[in-house]
Amino acid sequence: MSAPLSPIRPGYLLFLGHERALLDAKTARGIQQWRPELCIGQYRLDAETVDLGLPDMTPAEAFAAGARTMVIGVAPFGGGFAPDWIDPMVDALAGGLDLASGMHSRLTDEPRIAAAAREHGRALHDVRHASGRIPIATGRKRGGRRLLTVGTDCAIGKKFTALAIHAALRDRGIDASFRATGQTGILIAGGGIAIDAVVADFAAGAAELLSPDNAPDHWDVIEGQGSLFHPCYAGVSLALLHGSQPDAIVVCHDPRRHHIDGYPDYPLPSLARCIEANLAAARLTNRDARCVGIALDTSGMDEGERAAAIAAATAETGLPAFDPIATGAAPVIDQLLS
Amino acid sequence: MSAPLSPIRPGYLLFLGHERALLDAKTARGIQQWRPELCIGQYRLDAETVDLGLPDMTPAEAFAAGARTMVIGVAPFGGGFAPDWIDPMVDALAGGLDLASGMHSRLTDEPRIAAAAREHGRALHDVRHASGRIPIATGRKRGGRRLLTVGTDCAIGKKFTALAIHAALRDRGIDASFRATGQTGILIAGGGIAIDAVVADFAAGAAELLSPDNAPDHWDVIEGQGSLFHPCYAGVSLALLHGSQPDAIVVCHDPRRHHIDGYPDYPLPSLARCIEANLAAARLTNRDARCVGIALDTSGMDEGERAAAIAAATAETGLPAFDPIATGAAPVIDQLLS
């Protein structure tokens, strides 16, 4: 068991197995999109495996080229390791690489992988699972500033929005850290805590641990999870909101979605209601919490539709709206720093 | 690993170890107070052990008298099993009794206890830990009616209030079940789920599992946990609130407490604010949720102080107020059934 925030050593070999579907390589693609400088090579088990355009490497070649961790970049249905992955994974450990996986199955539960890691002194990062000792929350105000992405639903752009805001802050020369709370985010950031995998009593404590005391001008940009309006995950969202004690929130929304995904009896809240509920809850741990922008998923819209959606969100809320992928997060930075 | 709701077999032998302090036997005393009919005997390891006034019995005598589970009724500092408890616990398993414990240490982690349970086909109930497979929440409306106790803080009477309301409903001949969400409650009820020990993603699902579909006139009276105003545990409270989809809530409060216990920077909310926040959240999964009463902890007050506290709470909220221990819950039942 590693510490809750044990860092994943940078320099990644992206393991793609026999994956045929680009969609199922989304972990690898997310890392490649947001941290191309981390991606040393790809490891494909045969010629028909999806190709991300990275150099093909064996673990030994990747180690020689600077890689230190082999990341399982695919998420096959069922969430388990294929039997023919075990030999390559053991080879990677023998060749000097740690392993990192965001799958439901745990690296540490595979006897041959666990034994090889022990033998070679390598780390195993099961980033979907929270490991190590997490304290309960203190509620104490911490130094530094924090932004948390929240949402009208799950899977509505909270990770991408946080990454885009983090990138925009860095572009302005502002000291900022991206704080990951889900498996893909953790692999992108090289560390973090899968907040929804923490025992409920400790979830707010995990959020506190994730964004520790910092310099007064430093921004933590924290990846949100779930939604206060989700009948399954609102508790996770509230614990993250309280533990993050954000100075600023950004609400993520898809204007084409009308009910919670998979829960047709649960209508999506209006932007105004979502802002109000999140700020009311956030103010328990930070009385100065405010909403600084609306992040819209406008994927698949044409330019005119996108501009109309952004204008409508701004008209409804009086706040800058943007698409973190299509337009970038620059519009929200002025608001954030005002 | 047992199923999440595997029942604890009734007929308890209360194990008191060498406990000298009545206060540290509060698990046993809670069971004795609320379920005296379950308590067949006590098992004290020496003559100086606290005496609950039950017949002293060995496991074999207790089994012959109808006991089927030995309950660890003490909670020594540190939360572990004393070394000299192991022999008596193995004897109990050999003598036909299951074991149930609300301690942090797990029965299943003690090799001799685990081996004896296997050998004799006995169950081990580690009720502080959630075991077995818990589904994620569906948000689907279930049949039957539900009351949840909520609070302005932790440790403010939510369990006692639920037990008192359950007893008052039964006294009126109304079909009702007490649903336990914490370790002492589970031992009293003979089943339940320690909701704060569930992985955060599944906490609302655990609350749904705890109070399944039921007859239209049946009431589940659900033990609340934490508080929406607690910087550490609000996520647990929200998940329980959403998963319970209560028709009615009762707010538990101690009029002498002015800040969250142990968190001096966090003032207690007013009763009005606590009602409003809980109802706003509850209405996500049950639009008809309403508050039916205020349960006050008036322990240590004299009659005049108690009457004044109850009158003040009623004046502030327009709702019946009561002390579940001192006055009983009858005042709230009319409101509940109106």
Image (cartoon, coloured by chain):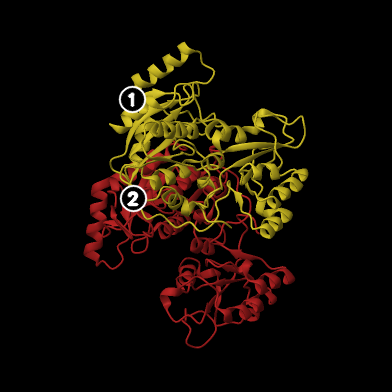
Chain colours: A yellow, B red
Between the C-alphas of marks 1 and 2, the distance is 27 Å
A72 with respect to B303 (left or right): right
Q: Name which of mark 1 and mark 2 comes first in the sequence.
A: 2
* Residue corresponding to mark 1: A319
A179 with respect to B323 (left or right): right
Q: Secondary structure at mark 1?
A: loop
Report the mark closest to the observer, 1 or 2.
2
Location of the C terminus of chain A by quadrant is top left
Q: Is residue B138 visible?
A: yes
Q: Chain of mark 1?
A: A
Q: Chain of mark 2?
A: A
A127 with respect to B19 (left or right): right
Residue lying furthest top: A304
Q: Position of residue A238 (x, y in %)?
A: 42, 43
Location of the N terminus of chain A by quadrant is bottom right
- Which residue shows up at 51% across the image and 62% down it? B183
Amino acid under label 1? Answer: Leu
State the mark number for residue A108.
none
The relative height of residue A318 versus residue A11 in the rendered view (above or below) is above
The relative height of residue B124 versus residue A50 in the rendered view (above or below) is below
Count the labels in the image.
2
State the mark number for residue A142.
2
For the residue pair A170 and A138, the one nearer the viewer reads as A170
Amino acid under label 2? Answer: Arg
The relative height of residue B333 versus residue A226 in the rendered view (above or below) is below
